[in-house]
Amino acid sequence: MEELVGREIWFVTGSQHLYGPQTLEKVAEHSREIAAALDASKHLPVKVVFKPVLTTPEAVRELCLEANSSRHCIGLITWMHTFSPARMWIAGLTLLKKPFAHLHTQYNREIPWSEIDMDFMNLNQAAHGDREFGFIGSRLRIERKVVVGHWADEVTQSELGVWARAASAWADWQGMKVARFGDNMRDVAVTEGDKVQAQIQLGYSVYGYGVGDLVKYVNETSDAEVDELVKAYMDEYEVVPELKPGGAKHASLRYGARLEIGLRGFLTAGNFKAFTTTFEALHGLDQLPGLAVQRLMRDGYGFGAEGDWKTSALVRAMKVMNHGMPGGVSFMEDYTYHLSKTGDKVLGAHMLEICESIAAGKPRLEIHPLSIGGKADPVRLVFDSQTGPAVGASIVHMGGRFRMVANVVDVVPTDAPLPRLPVARALWIPRPNLKVAAAAWIHAGGAHHTGFGYSVTAEHLRDFAEMAGIEFLLIDEHTKVDEFKDKLRWNDLFYLLNNGL
């Protein structure tokens, strides 16, 4: 993703003039070392930039304004090496538009028992300096992540890395455009929502297009472009005989390639990062896009079926969070259950559009009838997903607020082969179990569409939701339905008092 190149997190240290130039020089020296270590850490996906130590309200304000206006800065890491009176941070923090993480650490790892003196104590004051800074963040009611631990520890760096990935996704949402071909699937409720509020609060905008706008791009695709892409298909996938050159259905594959080229061209021309389709708006297209959607998701685009723009934006955000990590991210849907005495499971799939980034092996390129949509048989990639821990998440609009519901799951191998199921799929066991997870999800109003990922965790999603001001509800191994319902009631009260329902 080219969008991630050049992004920065600024390392900001607070102090005050009271300590004198010698101590401040040492503060700057230590801060520079910590920033360099974080920048070199494998856990942080973007550049960490040292900023001069802040000692006055004017300097804090200017730094925050500079961060706001910087195209490269996606957030701050703050640390109070010494005591830094928190009133000097008010003017800056009230203006700050970028997220920040509060790193509660200290330069030295251990107390030098035989050498410690008051000079050491006056320099290494984060234990109470960060508490002073923490107060003003809470007094101003600013959402931020607090990370506690020594800066050189991998656990500390990993927590900062999670936050940095969430900050990258949040920055990506600002000004993002989502293309919506057709409208919502008729009469469906959960995929609707307030696009105006999304743009105000979340930063991205949704643009509606008639499918004819896409058809123009598809029809203008050249045979030479199709030839080149078909060759790539042959190289990348196991292709069934009827789709190969000379096969009875090869023309269908060529049309699938034409769909991909046209759709990619439309999204590129409009600078879109996410999109939706619907099988109820296909006038002028021979197939519902399947293969095209799968490959565009693989390349980082967000996607939502049946006009689901919120899930499309979420999949894009999870793609950004996942950048450089294994496991992949896909659009997903809870499709059908395995209710067995040996253990309940969920079979996740969709009609066509599951991203190949989650495939366990080399996908097969196949063609099968689609019983809805009234169009020609579409081409698609068929595969079993990777196994292991994963998370599925949904964003819904509750009328007065956005809500994210996330469920930690364990993806497992299928009990037996699925030779007649013509779609990509994942089989998982929800935590703590299907009975609790499904009940909690339904009580929360979570959608049937989700963003689904392996390396993106509940912590990433929580950090992201807090940056966005989205209510976050987690279903995991600790969830109990009664307690979860109580949380829903308490959250309703909070948001009523805070925002109105």
Image (cartoon, rainbow, N blue to C red):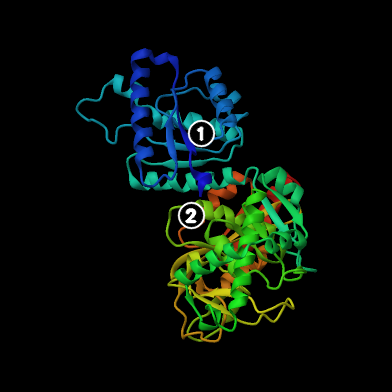
Residue shown at 54% from the left, 52% from the top: 462
Q: Nearer the viewer, residue 365 or 327?
A: 365
Give the residue furthest to the left. Answer: 114
Question: Which secondary structure, mark 2?
Answer: helix
As drawn, the residue found furthest toward the right would be 187
> 353 or 8, which lies in front?
353
Q: Residue at x 47, y 85 (%)?
A: 417
User: Is residue 340 something one can see in this rendering?
Assistant: yes
Judging by the rendered image, the residue that carries numbered circle 1 is: 134
Residue 158 picture location, percent across and down: 40, 48
Which of 227/203 is in front? 227
**In the rendered image, which residue does mark 2 sit on?**
322
From this view, report whether residue 175 is shown above or below residue 354. Answer: above
The residue shown at (68%, 71%) is: 288
**Mark nearer the N terminus (1 vs 2):** 1
Identify the image quadrant of residue 366: bottom right
Mark 1 vs mark 2, CA separation in Å: 30 Å
How far across and how far down the image is residue 325, in percent? 43, 55
- Residue 316 in percent (x, y) is at 58, 55
Query: Which of the two residues, 80 or 192, is positioned nearer the viewer here?
Result: 192
Give the residue type that dot 1 points to. Gly
Q: Secondary structure at mark 1?
A: helix
